[in-house]
Image (spheres, rainbow, N blue to C red):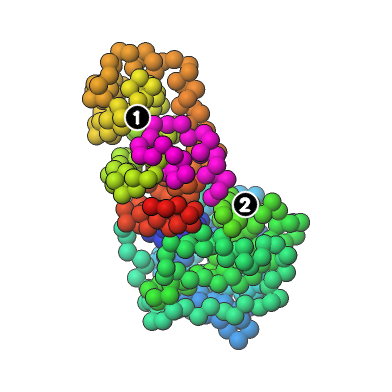
Amino acid sequence: MIRVSVRFASAAVLISLCLIGFEVATRAQKPTTASAPSLVPLPAEIQCLLKGVSSSMTADANDNVHYSGGSVESLACRISGGGPKGIPLASNAISEDGTLATRDFGPVKITISQLNSAQVQFSISPAMIQPLKEFLGGSGGPIEVPPADFNAPSAPTPAPTAAPMFPKPDPANFTATSPTTEVVNAFLNASWGYDENRVWQVEGILKTPVDGVSKVIAYVGDKTGKTKPIGMQFYVMADQKHIIASDEVLSFGERPFDDNRAELQKRADGPYRGSASKEFELVEFADFQCPHCKEAQPNMEKLAVDFPNARLVFQNFPLPQHPAAAGAAAYGVCVNKLGGSAAFFKYASAVFEGQDGLSTPDGETLTLNSAVTTAGLDPAKVEACAKTPEVEAQVKASAQLAKDVNVNQTPALMVNGRQIPANAPYETLKQIILYQEKLDGIKQ
């Protein structure tokens, strides 16, 4: 989806998703007058990444933009040829002069110079450069950041008292012929327009050294003044249908969800509730052993009531870390095959209710057989069905569909092709669904 958080195709409070956080990939740059005299820019072979930036920005007389106050979720760096490593922070707070305190390497000054390249400069004490190199020299793994708490308050930073004032766009920053500002705004409107308080401004659409690939720079804020403006960037691919934002490839365009919508209409063949029509389709991808999928079920029940015109489809997406998930999915396929959708949803409700029983082989058998009985079917017949190659292939096909529409976590809900965490706060979930319904011209 873009921690303040905002993500494409998801709500400000969601940010699981999955989607893009305000992460700014960084490279070392030449020193600027904004850096403190005792600090020097990182050498070119060290690149760093900020995640979850919540900060105001101020512009100097040269239109260079600097962080000022606020907080970050994490800082990670890597040295050429190595993997990224998290840098332990003494505090997540960004000082008013743009300094972040690390635990082992002293203060790190953060500035955003050269707005036309939207690059961040990091400066540290010269004495800390070699220790940092040694720290980064080993092989690093993925940058691990705890998932955002849907109900957690925003970082305790002073909020502005008025709508954000974005820097005036410089025509010199619009060097690419595509996409146009109109297309970018249509994309952002499709992604974020459900939130009437969110405002943004496209600051630049730049050519890159790669033919056909453009870099988009924008600022986003809250017109109520509750959150501070944040800068972001993403790269539009040559096909004009995808972007790279942080480390994710996402759909792009004036109607970015249409391709996934068409794919789901064609291939989502799981049990369903509600309308037989696929015009307004909500597809849930879930894993029976995933605790967050269990948490999402009250949301799904409410959606079935609040959106009677929708087709609510259940698709299996058993994750490899859950040993009982594939078996529970196979049983579910057979329950649907032998008893229909009504029997399946009774089965699914019982499995989620008894989810703790899936943790042992004996408990798995008892839990699944009990759920089958609740659905009104014969456990022996369902067990025999679940062992067939045909059913195994169906479960794998459903998981492949999830991957093909860029679902990489559970629970996920695809609303006419638009991905949302299914366990998001219900009112936020409903708000986004109503907005997507409006975008697609569907009558309630």
Tell me which amino acid carries mark 1: Ser
Please say if 26 is above or below 309.
Answer: below
Residue 143 locus on image (x, y percent):
50, 51
Does the stretch in magenta take in 158? Answer: no
Residue 95, visible in the rendered structure? no
Residue 246 locus on image (x, y percent):
56, 55
Residue for badge 2:
242
Residue for badge 1:
341
Most extreme residue toward the bottom, as rendered? 61
Question: Which quarter of the figure has residue 32?
Answer: bottom right
Could you classify mark 2 by the number of other residues whose Cα lies within 10 Å: few (under 14), some (14-19), or many (20 or more)? some
First in sequence: mark 1 or mark 2? 2
Q: Nearer the viewer, mark 1 or mark 2?
A: 1
Question: Which quarter of the figure has residue 43?
Answer: bottom right
Residue 8 locus on image (x, y percent):
50, 57
Residue 177, visible in the rendered structure? yes
Most extreme residue toward the front, as rendered? 443
Residue 166 relative to residue 294: left or right: right
Taking depth in this image into account, of 306 and 9 the one nearest to the observer is 306
Question: Which quarter of the figure has residue 92?
Answer: bottom left
Name the residue: 32% across, 60% down: 152
Please say if 250 is above or below 234.
Answer: above
Magenta stretch: give its range: 257-282
Per the model, the C-alpha gap separating discs 1 and 2 is 35 Å
